[in-house]
């Protein structure tokens, strides 16, 4: 008794089942690829989170850490000292105060329109010697800052009167 061919053209085609070794190797390669992608994703997210969490130091904090912060970009908060603003060809030169600590700031570029004496600002830049060289001045122009931090403005000696 002859057996019937398994295909129409009469050829027997055997289905091959992958060996356990080949299956494990493919699974291991997939796991390594997944792990590499996961590590890359974690690194990218950590770098993004670090820059997003950039906070600011007050003038006394920044002056106390000036030696370790030299050349490093960070943000510093204070109140613009009245009578200290001087226009320069590059931008503006002024003093920033918080409590009794005062730092000289040289802004490279144009300050924002709301920049004026006796207002709280955050400057971004780095120390060059004893001078803070800034490339960005951020002026808080709403009452939400004062409402959220009433003691910070009053303690710094600003013009805000609670």
Image (cartoon, helix red, strand yellow):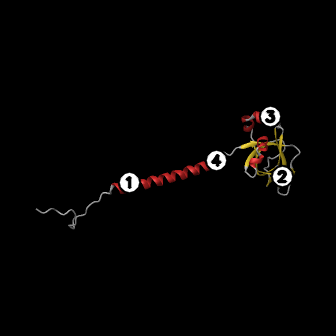
Circle 2: is it few (<14), some (14-19), or many (20+) Cα within 10 Å? Answer: some
In this view, the residue farthest toward the left is 1
Q: CA distance from mark 1 to mark 4?
A: 39 Å
Question: Where does residue 146 sit, x and y in percent of width and height?
Answer: 75, 36
- Residue that numbered label 3 is attached to: 155
- Element at badge 4? helix
Q: CA distance from mark 3 to mark 4?
A: 29 Å
Circle 4: is it few (<14), some (14-19), or many (20+) Cα within 10 Å? Answer: few
Q: Name the side, left or right, on which 53 lies relative to 155.
A: left
Question: Where does residue 24 sit, x and y in percent of width and height?
Answer: 38, 54
Earlier sequence position, callout 4 versus callout 2 = 4
Earlier sequence position, callout 1 versus callout 2 = 1
Which of the two discs, 1 and 2, sits closer to the camera?
A: 1
Q: CA distance from mark 1 to mark 2?
A: 67 Å
Q: CA distance from mark 2 to mark 3?
A: 26 Å
Say which residue appears at 46% left-offset and 54% top-offset.
Answer: 32
Question: Where does residue 76 sit, x and y in percent of width and height?
Answer: 76, 45
- Quadrant into which the C terminus falls: top right
- Residue that numbered label 1 is attached to: 24
Earlier sequence position, callout 1 versus callout 4 = 1
**Frontmost residue, 69 versus 154:** 69
- Residue that numbered label 2 is attached to: 92
Which of the two discs, 3 and 4, sits closer to the camera?
A: 4
- Residue that numbered label 4 is attached to: 50
């Amino acid at each position: 008794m002859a057996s019937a061919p398994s295909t129409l053209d009469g050829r027997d085609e055997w289905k091959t089942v992958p060996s356990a070794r080949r299956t494990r190797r493919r699974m291991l390669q997939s796991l390594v690829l997944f792990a590499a992608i996961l590590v890359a994703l974690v690194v990218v997210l950590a770098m993004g989170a670090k820059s997003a969490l950039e906070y600011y130091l007050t003038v006394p904090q920044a002056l106390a850490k000036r030696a370790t912060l030299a050349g490093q970009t960070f943000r510093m908060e204070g109140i613009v000292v009245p009578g200290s603003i001087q226009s320069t060809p590059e931008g503006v030169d002024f003093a920033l105060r918080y409590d009794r600590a005062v730092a000289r700031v040289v802004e490279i570029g144009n300050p924002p329109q709301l920049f004026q004496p006796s207002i709280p600002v955050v400057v971004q830049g780095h120390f060059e010697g004893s001078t803070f060289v800034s490339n960005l001045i951020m002026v808080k122009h709403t009452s939400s800052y004062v409402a959220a931090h009433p003691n910070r403005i009053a303690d710094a000696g600003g013009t805000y009167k609670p």
